[in-house]
Amino acid sequence: MKRLINHIVLFLSVLMMIYSCRHQVENATKVQQLPAIYPDYIGVTIPVDIAPLDFNFVGGEIDCMDVLVRGSKGGELHIQGDWADFDVDDWKQLTRQNMDGELVFTVCVAKDGQWTQYKDFKVYISKYPLTDYGLTYRRIAPGYEVGSPGIGIYQRDIHTFEETPILKVSAVYGHCINCHTANRTDPSLFTMQFRGEGGGTLVQKDGVQQWLNTKTDSTKAAGSYAYWHPSGKYCAYTVNSVHQNFHVGTKKRIEAYHKFSDLLLLDTRTNQLLLDSLLMTEDQEIFPAFSPDGNYLYYSSSKPCDLPLEYEKVKCSVCRIAFDENSGTFGTEVDTLINAGITGKSCTLVRPSYDGRWLMYTMSDHSNFPVFQDDADLWLMDLKTGETREMKVVNSPRTESYHNWSSDSHWFVFSSKRENGEYAQLYLASVDEKGHVTKPFLLPQRNPKKYYNEMFDSYNVPDFTKTPVQLDVHEVHRQVFEGNRIQTEIK
């Protein structure tokens, strides 16, 4: 019996070998054009150990695709199938072997018994590793309702294809979850805002959840859009109200705006709120971000106007104010780094790199809510020289926004609606010490055409995390529905 089993195993092995070799690339017609692939990974720069760049052929119906990948420093992969489906471990090994080198892709496709070989293309392996665990982001259908049960905060291991939910609205039904923020990619310090009846602000430090009511008699609303001080002692929040207006008879669909917007600081040790008159003016102060050394708070500010009638007059300057960590106080003057009165544009979502070199922000014609602005693009300021420039390599005719830095400041993630103007997807790119930016690449997925065609969610508020976020969902559910909140007090 054992001998029979061995013969069967041998026969099946031979049969599999015959099957795997039946699609030999023979007499291929060579053409001097690049293959039409999705996503467009041609000429991108990637980090070592990133999840495989699986791709589909989109240049018409085919019977089979053959892909050979050769490393400039050695090694190769050879696969064949309906799409380019690389083994995760083999792919990682090839990228490690070719760090600061390149991969050359040869793509052949078969149709009606005839092979076509396309012009080779390259993918470059950066000298900068991306050691962070992965990304966090909110997945939400691009609609306009509040509290949809499909909304969720997720995390993705960028070195594999594994995605796991951190928290979904279905676990806290009736609430909208948003503004999830870790401290400089460290998820041991984590905050999240819950909107709706019985909402509140979650502040989690080293796994211990605290549920706060950040609305007081001296503030107009609860905190939202958050950013941690690098010490973890403080967290800055925006206090505002978000409204939506819909256009009729124009190509533009929606305008989001804020009736008011102020900034405040939460002392996470005492649950006291630190208010400053310079950050609570009749102007709209929004989107705070601390400098890496914690000595400054960056933010955007727009002059008051009659909203929603004068929505096109909402144009934000980039501002900065000094901060003293020991006393928990702000400076007495506000520096304007980019003046909307001079540029005629609106600059929002300022994000300093963690090495203190760069300041990335979104520029659009107007608005302090750029995710709905088709002309929103990413810009970069050199904090050494004050020089600013458009990041033309990463921008598209559609919306670019919601960007954040990796822990080593050589990689960044952003959301873009470049594919269809409706669904925001995540792209990654790198920047070197001289500010050279590489062509962005779409977040890899297995069988990406199928995945993204069947994905009916937009990605927003992406950020890197060094390690996975640990959140006790059962404790979240209990706290949300018991409704017990620690009332913050004004210091």
Image (cartoon, grey):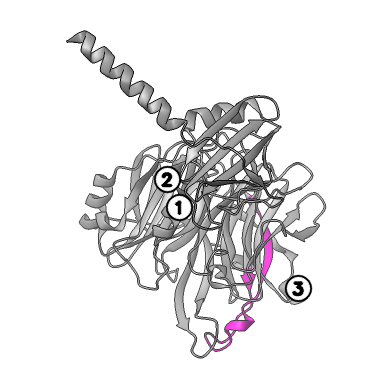
Q: Nearer the viewer, residue 51 or 28?
A: 28
Which percent across, then down, holds residue 142? 42, 68
Magenta stretch in the rendered image: 301-323
Per the image, is 88 magenta? no
Mark 1 vs mark 2, CA separation in Å: 6 Å
Q: To which quarter of the image does residue 174 belong? A: bottom left
Residue on which the image places disc 3: 343
Q: Which residue occupies 32% across, 23% down?
A: 12
Which percent across, then down, holds residue 316? 65, 71
Given the current orientation, which residue lies at the most extreme left position? 1
Say if 314 sits above or below 27 in the image: below
Q: Earlier in the sequence, mark 1 or mark 3?
A: 1
| Left or right: 471 as drawn, with respect to 393 | left
Q: What amino acid type is highlighted by mark number 2?
A: Gln
Q: Are marks 1 and 2 in contact (CB under 8 Å)?
A: yes
Mark 3 vs mark 2, CA separation in Å: 37 Å
Q: Which mark is residue 127?
A: none
Residue on which the image places disc 2: 155
Q: Nearer the viewer, mark 1 or mark 3?
A: 1
Q: What amino acid type is highlighted by mark number 3?
A: Thr
Q: Earlier in the sequence, mark 1 or mark 2?
A: 1
Q: Is residue 291 visible?
A: yes
